[in-house]
Amino acid sequence: MEDTPRSLRLQIAVAGRTNSGKSSFMNLITGQDVAITSPIPGTTTDVVEKAMELRPLGPVLFLDTAGIDDETELGGRRVERSRRALDRADVILLVTTPGVWAAPEEKVLAAARERKTGLIAVVNKCDQTSPAPEFLAMLKEKTSFAPIVTSSVGGNPEREKALPQLKDALLAACPDDFVQPPPLIGDLTTSGDVIIMIVPVDKQAPKGRIIMPQMQVLRDALDHGVQTLTVRESEYKAALNALKAPPALVICDSQVVDLMVRETPQAVPCTTFSILFARLKGDMNLLAAGTAALAKLSPGDPVMVAEACTHHASEDDIGRVKIPRWLAQKTGGELKVKVASGRDFPDDLGDQKMIIHCGSCMLNRRETLRRMTLAHNAGVPITNYGMAISYSKGVLERVLSPFPEALETYKKALK
Ligand code: SF4
């Protein structure tokens, strides 16, 4: 379970004032000294992450943030990092102490409401003063969930009291799409079907393994009793010919989408890993509509390429080199491309004409949706690498056809 990727864990941000006992509370719950705790305010300088198994919820990731009220210069940077942690949180725990609720707590409440993220109040340090019933009622009214009443001193007995309260609260507050995420291929196949996955093994492929989207599709196929035939693009035709009946679905890496479309009989549905992830991680229809805006770009238009991981860019980099090149061919001239990598997705999208986001395989659904919402609210069309590549190779409609609603949305947006 320790191997579960971060993007698949329920992400729980622990927020609150400097020295409200956030880190001690997290230590109490995880049973480990993972955050830096000190009686000196502002000791937590960065977002500290701790992964654990919290049955029956499953794998979770706690994000211990800096004090929301830290007004020092260094604090400004800490608060900015904490704000980004709230962007990806599925649930926020707001740690306070008996009777304490003012502007900093209201700020966290407003951030949770803006992000439509469940907020649970944790009243800490109750060994020192008991919280008044009216205070607890006020917290429940503001957050819609019963507050957790605890003390982070006292070790195991306190942990045994706090853990069941926390699990109940998390179950009530965690988003429906975490409990039941959109399907990957489950609704496109039936048990007993055979599908083909086309996985290029080029110099960009990691050594000795396949990448996460391919692994997840493979696992989803196993979960649904679907048989998979995994081949490189050079073996695809032979694999098709070797089957007694046509496959129920073909899925490829976007980089070989033109080859897949060319060689796949018209009656066989085909799509890309990236398009499957557009639905799993985000809002597929919004991305489909956004892709249509690529047709309206002119040379010189500012376009932001957003990549969720930071990595050394190769000369053949997909986001920085290949997609801009393909789009320039389609548009008739170079675009003004700016790259935002890692967690640096700006709140202010300025005068960007378009955002082309990576496949989000390392982000959770909430953070991906948050980025899409920011783009949508700013009126900036957003697409993902997979859709942009399929568009630039002229095969988007074919690979969207297993998703009639998204295809329709794309066609309407083109008009
Ligand atoms: S940059 Fe995006 S698509 Fe690539 S590995 Fe990271 S999250 Fe996945």
Image: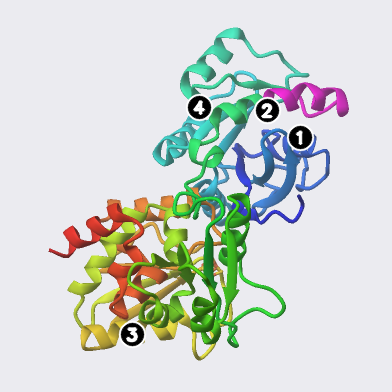
Label 3 and label 2: CA atoms lie apart by: 50 Å
Q: Nearer the viewer, residue 56 or 191?
A: 191
Q: Residue furthest front?
A: 244
Q: Earlier in the sequence, mark 4 or mark 2?
A: 4
* Span highlighted in magenta in the image: 151-167
Label 2 and label 1: CA atoms lie apart by: 9 Å
Q: What residue would you read off at disc 2?
A: 166
Position in image of residue 318 (x %, y %): 46, 81
Asked if marks 2 and 1 touch (Cβ < 8 Å), the reply is: yes
Q: What residue would you read off at disc 1?
A: 29
Q: Earlier in the sequence, mark 1 or mark 4?
A: 1
Q: Earlier in the sequence, mark 3 or mark 1?
A: 1
Q: In the image, which disc is placed on residue 326? A: 3
Q: Secondary structure at mark 4?
A: loop
Which amino acid type corresponds to the residue marked 2 in the rendered image?
Leu
Mark nearest the camera among 3 and 2 is 3
Q: Residue at x 42, y 63 (%)?
A: 275
Label 4 and label 2: CA atoms lie apart by: 23 Å
- For mark 1, does the 10 Å Cα neighbourhood hold few (<14), some (14 to 19), or many (20 or more) residues? many
Which amino acid type corresponds to the residue marked 3 in the rendered image?
Trp
Which amino acid type corresponds to the residue marked 4 in the rendered image?
Ala
- For mark 3, does the 10 Å Cα neighbourhood hold few (<14), some (14 to 19), or many (20 or more) residues? some
Q: Main secondary structure of the magenta part?
A: helix
